[in-house]
Image (cartoon, helix red, strand yellow):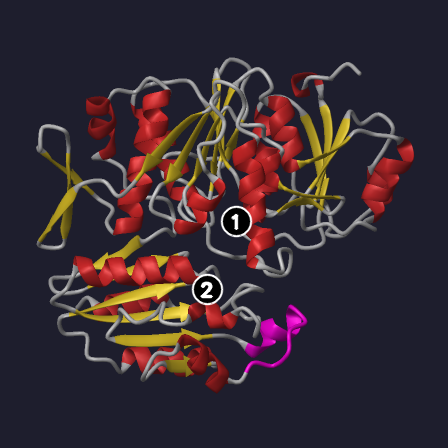
Amino acid sequence: MAVTPPSSLQRLHLIAIGGSIMHNLALALHRRGAHVTGSDDEIFEPAKSRLAAAGLLPAEEGWFAEKVTPDLDAVIVGMHARPDNPELLKAQELGLRVYSFPEFIYEASRDKQRVVIGGSHGKTSITSLILHVLRYHGRKFDYAVGAQLEGFDLMVQLTEDAPIIIIEGDEYLSSPIDRRPKFHLYQHHIGVISGISWDHINVFPTEEIYREQFKIFADMTPKAGTLIYDQNDEQVQLVTVPSNPDVNYIGYGPHEHVIRNGKTFLLNKKDEEVPVQVFGEHNLRNISAAKEVCKCLGIKGKDFYEALGSFKGAARRLELVREGEGSVVYKDFAHAPSKLKATATAFKKQYPQRKLVACLELHTFSSLNPQFLPQYAHTFDAPDVAVVYFNPHVLEHKRLPPLPPEAVAQAFQRPNLQVFTDSKLLAEFLHAQNWQGANLLMMSSGTFDGLDLAQLATEVTR
């Protein structure tokens, strides 16, 4: 069957247009000249304002089968929609081409070299590092990344002339009617596995099933393709055994470095010190992975380091909120056990003389699941003061059983762990701390239920 190139698809309807990546795709397609419509039952900021500014915001929230008409070239469905979505059912009834997000990205990049960054943690940072270096050196590229990056106004870019595309390869499901992990659909030429740590328990009920998805990804590396992987990660080693003589396997570890006065310096081949604005062993591994990818794309080592100096990190990934004379406040997207341990340990190592107060919000399905909670044992040992917060209403929304605070404390196996279920009491606790010579680290994929971090950061760094 002949494939219709997405560049010829001019009338597109996006189901669940308000999603983080979906509204960015809508804006990218609109920018390319396509006629874009969409629907969603809830649209939050910043998607709401961004869609409105482009004239793409639906007139009203909800699903409307009449929006799906025979003159559409295709429909793109986001993961937020349900299989019985009336617009999806109408598209299927009309026989329209229905794409998931990863399917569409693949079709749009069939003629490009595809670089896909996979892994339970680090993939956003590695992807953003590569994009930063390529842009610094004026290379043409397309991309799809899961976070807003400084200097990039969209999270998706699709052009006709870029020879390569850099894709953050999420292992979560592709769509409500396609239960394959997203990163299986991109068909990479260069693949990266940054680390494997069981997540998404609602979709992958066992560690073995979760790990198998990465094995499938690794085995999809084509002849003359390249697989770049963290050679120190035991789970990664289980799926990246160099078994195919036609594939180029490249292992990496943390980049050589020194730390002085809270600043990290990389050591290049000449043992020269290269100052960087990110820190922590996990970021040093991310830098190594990005360097290997850039080398495959023709970026020399000295050019990589030159670009790296101005890289500030991906948004919400160990992001500086405010710095004072003797204190700093950072926020981080960390929520999974491996991310929590890596971030908290790195932060304490970077500022060993300062007290570290660290706060984690349990916000995802996995993190709030009693079956998964034991995975957090001893992951929060590094901070001097460790705090865990969760909102019981989120449990109700996710249809999970009540979670007693004492069960959380027991799961972490951390003495003196503070557990809060009321954001006001959490704020009072943090405001009452002695911040002289102390740092604050706030970790969540949520917002701590509206806690005013800017005000708190001002107080901490006085």
Quarter of the rendering occupied by the N terminus: top right
Q: Secondary structure at mark 1?
A: loop
Q: Position of residue 455 (x, y in %)?
A: 31, 68
Q: Which residues are magenta?
A: 392-403
- Residue at figure coordinates x 22%, y 24% from the top left: 301
Residue 454 occupies which quadrant of the picture? bottom left
Q: Is residue 177 above or below residue 272?
A: below
Q: Position of residue 285 (x, y in %)?
A: 30, 43
Q: Nearer the viewer, mark 1 or mark 2?
A: 2
Can residue 142 be seen here? The reply is yes
- Residue at figure coordinates x 43%, y 69% from the top left: 376
Please, what is the three-letter code of the amino acid marked with disc 1?
A: Pro
Q: Which residue in the structure is indicated by mark 1?
A: 46
| Image mark count | 2
Taking the image as shown, residue 157 lies to the left or right of residue 61, namely left
Between 441 and 19, the one lying in front of the other is 441
What crowding class fits label 2: few (fewer than 14 Cα within 10 Å), some (14-19), or many (20 or more)?
Answer: few
Can residue 171 be seen here? The reply is no
What crowding class fits label 1: few (fewer than 14 Cα within 10 Å), some (14-19), or many (20 or more)?
Answer: few
Q: Position of residue 315 (x, y in %)?
A: 38, 47
Please, what is the three-letter code of the amino acid marked with disc 2?
A: Thr
Q: Which residue in the structure is indicated by mark 2?
A: 447
Q: Is residue 310 above or below residue 450?
A: above
Q: Position of residue 422 (x, y in %)?
A: 47, 81
Quarter of the rendering occupied by the C terminus: bottom left
Distance from the alpha carbon under mark 1 to that under mark 2? 14 Å
Taking the image as shown, residue 139 lies to the left or right of residue 73, namely left
